[in-house]
Amino acid sequence: MKKIDKLNIESLFEKASNSSRKRAHLNLHTSFEDKVQRLYIALIKGSYVEPHFHEKEHQWEMFVVQSGVLKVTLHNPDGSSITSFLIGDEQDVHAVEFEPGDVHSVECISDRALILEIKEGPFIEEQAKTLLKF
């Protein structure tokens, strides 16, 4: 059994605060080979995940916002914006699932946010995401 408590989460936010990317991960899976990858991601205001997509047909991913607010933007392949929406506290949307090929970016707009990310494994870093080239 795994328990994630306030101390784990606060430690994660401390790491995010000290990170140049303004975010930190806490993996709940035991291996990158696991069939289901589960992780908490702590984000600090201004953290920005640049427009990207996942190429492989098994590379869907789901974000469940536990606290805070994120701005999610869907993009065309050329990087232009299709639509944006807020997700999280006091929003109509609390979770989002991206299909493979969905070009998306994520920005933390609250002081901090905590998300649970779930995706199919295995996780292979070199194949994890494709960044758009502008």
Image: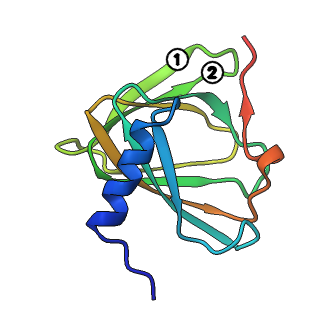
Going by the numbered disc 1, the residue's amino acid type is Ser
Going by the numbered disc 2, the residue's amino acid type is Asn
Residue at image coords 79%, 50%: 56
Q: Position of residue 33 (x, y in %)?
A: 76, 70
Q: Where 35 falls versus 56 (above or below)? A: below
Number of numbered discs on residues: 2
Name of the residue lying farthest toward the right = 126
Q: Secondary structure at mark 2?
A: loop
- The residue labelled by disc 2 is 76
For residue 84, which quarter of the picture? top left
Q: Are marks 1 and 2 in contact (CB under 8 Å)?
A: yes
Residue at image coords 26%, 43%: 68
| The C terminus sits in image quarter | top right
Chain-order first, disc 1 or disc 2: 2
6 with respect to 1 (left or right): left
- The residue labelled by disc 1 is 81
| The N terminus sits in image quarter | bottom left
Q: Where 110 falls versus 11 (above or below)? A: above
Residue at image coords 21%, 45%: 89
Q: Secondary structure at mark 1?
A: strand
